[in-house]
Image (tube, grey):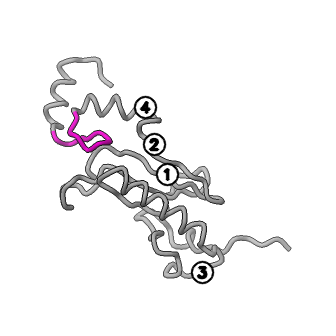
Amino acid sequence: MTHNPELTAYLDEVFAGTYFDRAGNPITWSRYSELWQNTEYRVVRRTPVGEFNVITAWLGSDRGFGYDEVPPKIFGTIVQAGDGFDDRTETFAANEADAITNHENAVAALGAWDRSTTEVSEIPKGLTPGPRARASELTQPKPTRA
């Protein structure tokens, strides 16, 4: 966060109405910056499922980008492979309760997914590939040991 009060005031003004706390209340850019640095505040849930991690986090800004209905979608759930950041899904929610539901649905879907599946269409409901997911990575059969 910047320590220049004039710049902070400018950014607070320019980004007014852009950022929201976990309760959905509008906050300033400077307050958002403070909250974003607090991992305990930012991460709602993190659940390992085999080689994947399901992560639900407060994002603080509208992921509907103003095109979706109100209220703003300020929480996101993604499925990551191992230590990488190549997300497998992205779902967004306007409130923490819906974000937790998205998280639980992703955990359940991953737990039920037969990874020997070879068709993207066979991925369970709730695990639609995100925009950066590569179909070949999602559908690769797990190696078997001889």
Residue 69, image x and y in percent? 19, 61
Q: CB atoms at circles 2 and 1 under 8 Å apart?
A: yes
> For mark 2, does the 10 Å Cα neighbourhood hold few (<14), some (14 to 19), or many (20 or more) residues?
some
Front-lying residue, 22 or 7: 22
Which one is earlier in the sequence, the residue at label 4 or at label 1? 4
Residue at the image point whose x is 53% and y is 69% from the top? 109
Tag 2 residue: 43
Tag 3 residue: 118
Q: Secondary structure at mark 3?
A: loop
Tag 1 residue: 55
Q: Secondary structure at mark 2?
A: strand
Q: Is residue 102 magenta?
A: no
Which one is earlier in the sequence, the residue at label 3 or at label 4? 4
Residue 65, image x and y in percent? 23, 55
Q: Amino acid at mark 3?
A: Thr
Tag 4 residue: 38
Residue at the image point whose x is 30% and y is 34% from the top? 32
In the rendered view, would you say 80 is above or below 14?
below
Q: Secondary structure at mark 4?
A: loop
In the rendered view, would you say 39 is above or below 129?
above
Q: How far apart are the alpha carbons under marks 4 and 2?
A: 9 Å
Q: Secondary structure at mark 1?
A: strand
Nearer the camera: disc 2 or disc 3:
2
Q: CB atoms at circles 4 and 2 under 8 Å apart?
A: no
Residue at the image point whose x is 25% and y is 41% from the top? 20
Q: How far apart are the alpha carbons under marks 2 and 3?
A: 32 Å
The magenta region covers: 17-27
Q: Amino acid at mark 4?
A: Asn
Q: Is residue 23 magenta?
A: yes
